[in-house]
Amino acid sequence: MISRALTAAGLAVTLLSGCAVNPVTGKQELSLISQGQEVALGEKQYPITQQQQGGEYVVDKSLQDYVSRVGQKLARVSDQPQLPYEFVVLNNGTPNAWALPGGKIAVNRGLLTLLEDEAELAAVLGHEIVHAAARHSAAAMSQQQVLGAGLAVLGAATQSTGYGDLVSLGGQLGGSAYIARHGRGDELEADKYGMRYMAAAGYNPQGAVELQRKFVKLSEGSQSGGLAALFASHPPSQARVDANIAHAKKLSSGGATNRAAYQQAIAQLKRDADAYATYDKALAAVKEKQYDRALNLTRQAQRQQPREAAFFQLEGDLLAQKEQYQAAHGAYDKAVQKNPGLFSHWLKRGLMSAQLNNYTDAERDLTRSMRYLETPHAHYFLGQVYEKQGNVQTAYGHYQTAAKAGGEIGTKAQARMQALGNKG
């Protein structure tokens, strides 16, 4: 009982000492994470999370510059303009946007095609900037830590909860752990102050009203299934629409919408809408195991937009499934050439090189893939490459790393480790 009391007392001291002022609202809030830790975490996880979610959209690189300009314009009038804000458009058809700690913000190409003008884009980016400026992710992580400590008190835990190096923790959990599903209060706060940033940056805050109206309408319609990710992290409601209307009345009724500029910025995405729709049909056919149909659709998408690397990666996947390894290697080679900044293109070309017994190229590509994203699959297949070359010690090290991931690839790695151990 004394131990529990001491632990509870320690928790109370932690809560008292862990309060910080919300830089946006000025309110005292729980924060067990310093802003320096938060910024470092975002810096580390940002490239990882991008790789996990499709990588940068590169077919029209001018769109990246456009979105970044709008984002930086809003960031400069935020309550934390000193944060190292970055904005990226991801090659992901799922309509969504997110913010990592420290101002690392992404918007999927799938969301951009739903918006009408720059004011609506500013509403999306302003909302995400508030999540970063108000340190919502830090608050969420702090609450999780306190919950863990509270459970330890109830269970009379005998060891510390150990929340030391949060940056290291980020590497263990993966970037998606920090794309928070914010509570209702945080969402309303992000709407309110995001609209203030919009007005300060010269945008019509009515764009935020129209954005929420659009989301409510979409959530009620037949298209809502495809918007599940967006609505899970940014749940729309008439209450949010009403709150935005009230906020807009308190702000300047003027401001720009810049519809023509926005429509020009997303013109390539709109021209490629049919190509991405064909690609989505191909992915649906894969799920139904209709591989020949999927391959035909993928090649149709390539004809519609021959610069999109994802279409060639899918072709490679389908040819590999048919055991046409040389042709699959050719498809992956095109994917690498069209977008060399995505880990999966290097990984899969490396796998095909290994399948074709070209171990020098396989080693190069698998190693290159890990510059962008370290995966257990790259470690496992590097293990195979080194094992076949007779470099057993290096092979064992890669298998050992892959085994830590668990799952099917971890089981395979453990089997190879055991086999090598038995040979020794």
Image (cartoon, rainbow, N blue to C red):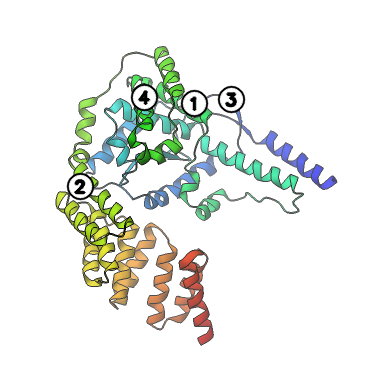
Residue 88 numbered tag: none
Q: Is residue 341 left or right of residue 84?
A: left
Q: Whole-percent x and y of residue 185?
A: 53, 28
Answer with mark 3 or mark 1, whichever residue precedes in sequence: 3
Residue found at the very far right of the displayed protein:
2
Residue at x 36% of width, y 13% of height: 252
Residue 189 numbered tag: 1
Asked whether 362 or 245 is in front, the reply is 245
- Could you tell me how far apart the alpha carbons at marks 4 and 3 are, in whole angstroms? 29 Å
Residue at x 36% of width, y 36% of height: 224
Give the residue type that dot 2 points to.
Ala
Residue 27 numbered tag: 3
For label 4, the residue is 213
Q: Secondary structure at mark 1?
A: helix
- Specify few, some or many for label 3: CA neighbours under 10 Å numbering under 14, 14-19, or 20 or more: few
- Could you tell me how far apart the alpha carbons at marks 2 and 4 are, in whole angstroms? 28 Å
Which is closer to the viewer, label 3 or label 1?
Answer: 1
Answer with mark 2 or mark 1, whichever residue precedes in sequence: 1
Answer with mark 2 or mark 3, whichever residue precedes in sequence: 3
